């Protein structure tokens, strides 16, 4: 699972960097929040978690790890798309979408935290 998370983290890194370059070229920074979240919750967090799962394989084999993996990787894209569409359209449904994606992501991260606190010896 560690290698899978590292590969996913690199995809988020490429997206975040490309997004930052786009904002720099166009001088339009309305979506900076999306850029920051992609880099922090996608690239950095998943890379660190992937390294931890690689270094401590007993963490990667748990039900908590699998739950975290899926909730994080479902919730984060939903949150990012929701934030982007909320900013661009101001439609209230997209604020709700972003919140739902955020809640899913946070629940996943709590599974990760519980897994580490319980199983890292």
Image (cartoon, helix red, strand yellow):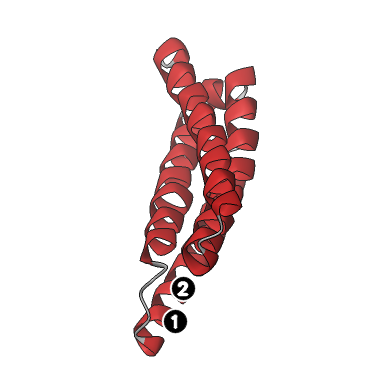
Q: Is residue 107 visible?
A: yes
Q: Residue 111 location in percent, x, y?
A: 52, 22
Please name the residue shown 46% across and 38% down the image: 49
Quick check: 43 above or below 85? above
Q: Is residue 7 visible?
A: no
Nearer-the-camera pick, 91 or 71: 91
Callout 1–callout 2 Cβ contact below 8 Å:
yes
Which residue position is annotated with label 1? 22
Residue 102 is tagged as: none
Which residue position is annotated with label 2? 19
Quadrant into which the C terminus falls: top left
Q: Quadrant of residue 39?
A: bottom left
Nearer-the-camera pick, 101 or 111: 101
Element marked by disc 2: helix
Q: Is 81 situated left or right of 45 in this image?
A: right
Q: Residue 32 location in percent, x, y?
A: 37, 66
Q: Quadrant of residue 5?
A: top right
Q: Residues within 10 Å of mark 1 (few under 14, many from 20)?
A: few
Quadrant into which the N terminus falls: top right
């Amino acid at each position: 699972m560690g290698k899978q998370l590292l590969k996913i983290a690199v995809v988020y890194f490429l997206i975040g960097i490309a997004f930052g370059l786009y904002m720099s070229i166009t001088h339009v920074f309305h979506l900076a929040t999306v850029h920051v979240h992609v880099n922090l919750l996608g690239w950095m967090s998943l890379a660190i978690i992937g390294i931890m799962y690689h270094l401590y394989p007993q963490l990667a084999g748990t039900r908590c790890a699998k739950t975290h993996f899926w909730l994080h990787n479902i919730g984060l894209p939903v949150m990012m798309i929701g934030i982007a569409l909320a900013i661009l359209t101001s439609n209230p449904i997209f604020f709700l979408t972003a919140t739902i994606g955020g809640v899913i992501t946070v629940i996943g991260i709590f599974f990760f935290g519980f897994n580490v606190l319980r199983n890292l010896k």
